């Protein structure tokens, strides 16, 4: 993948935090652009309708502007596109965060959706880890295998440098369960990327760095 930042190191704190990432393989060709200090504007086209809908939720509820254009081997199945979108969007967010100076770092949310309740907690620690406690009542949503959503979250956590815990406490409707996971991720991410006005020049770690450290 290739990545570029819109706010080079040394830019003033007021400079918008953004990045673009391109992934070009035999399986997928995806370009993603994010603006962390956005309004939740999105333009998303992956070729998978339900994935587009979930990425729109991620943008809208995190207030991160997200643009994604993807093409790939959808004639085989949706696995490569779903997983690679996780990698690309996560990498774009990690690139936009830079050294993570001034961020709140942690975020969490409980998201109810009718009969479903999901809890998400994350740490932008640069130590990728996923805990996924989500049971899907059905194996498919339309043409999409529901097992692929774990693949998205795994790839996203890995490339974003994020410790991510997702747990659906209860729920019956598969659509509601998946959507509450994405909305919970969005709301938690919105907290974690916010600049802390009391520590905007400090890296939020006693190590003084968030390069895979405590």
Image: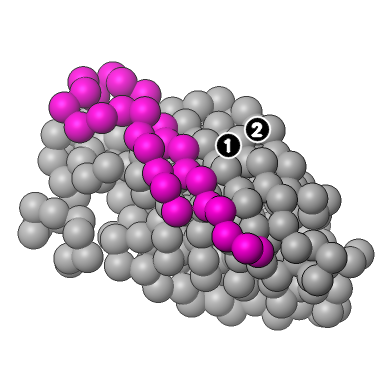
Helix, strand or loop at label 1? It is strand
Q: Quadrant of residue 193?
A: top left
Picture residue at 60% right of the left edge, 72% below the top: 151
**Nearer-the-camera pick, 10 or 37:** 10
Q: Farthest residue toward the left? A: 207
**Residue that mark 2 sits on:** 42
Residue 195: image location, x then y, percent = 30, 34
**Camera-nearest residue between 152 and 68:** 68
Q: Is residue 99 in sight in this rendering?
A: yes
Q: Residues within 10 Å of mark 2 (few under 14, many from 20)?
A: many
Mark identifier at residue 66: 1
Q: Secondary structure at mark 2?
A: strand
Q: Which residues are magenta?
A: 1-27
Q: Position of residue 174 (x, y in %)?
A: 81, 68
Q: In the shown orientation, is residue 106 left or right of residue 81?
A: left
Q: Is residue 53 left or right of residue 81?
A: right
Quadrant in the rendering for residue 59: top right
Q: Say which quadrant the C terminus sits in.
A: bottom left
Residue 158: x and y in percent read 43, 66
| Displayed quadrant of residue 85 | bottom right
Residue visible at 91% across and 64% down in the picture: 142
């Amino acid at each position: 993948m290739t990545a570029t930042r819109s706010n080079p190191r040394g830019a003033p704190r007021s400079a918008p935090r953004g990045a673009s990432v391109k992934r070009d393989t035999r399986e997928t060709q995806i370009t993603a652009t994010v603006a962390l200090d956005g309004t939740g504007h999105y333009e998303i086209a992956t070729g998978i309708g339900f994935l587009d809908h979930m990425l729109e939720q991620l943008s809208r509820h995190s207030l991160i502007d997200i643009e994604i254009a993807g093409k790939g081997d959808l004639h085989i199945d949706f696995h490569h596109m779903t997983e690679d979108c996780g990698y690309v969007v996560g990498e774009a967010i990690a690139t936009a965060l830079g050294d993570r100076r001034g961020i709140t770092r942690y975020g969490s949310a409980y998201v109810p959706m009718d009969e479903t309740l999901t809890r998400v907690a994350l740490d932008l620690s640069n130590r990728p880890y996923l805990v996924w406690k989500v049971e899907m009542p059905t194996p498919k949503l339309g043409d999409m295998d529901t097992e692929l959503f774990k693949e998205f979250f795994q790839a996203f956590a890995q490339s974003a440098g994020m410790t991510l815990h997702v747990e659906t406490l209860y729920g019956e409707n598969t659509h509601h369960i998946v959507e509450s996971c994405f909305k919970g991720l969005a709301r938690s991410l919105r907290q974690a990327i916010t600049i802390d006005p009391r520590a905007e020049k400090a890296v939020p770690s006693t190590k003084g760095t968030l390069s895979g450290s405590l």
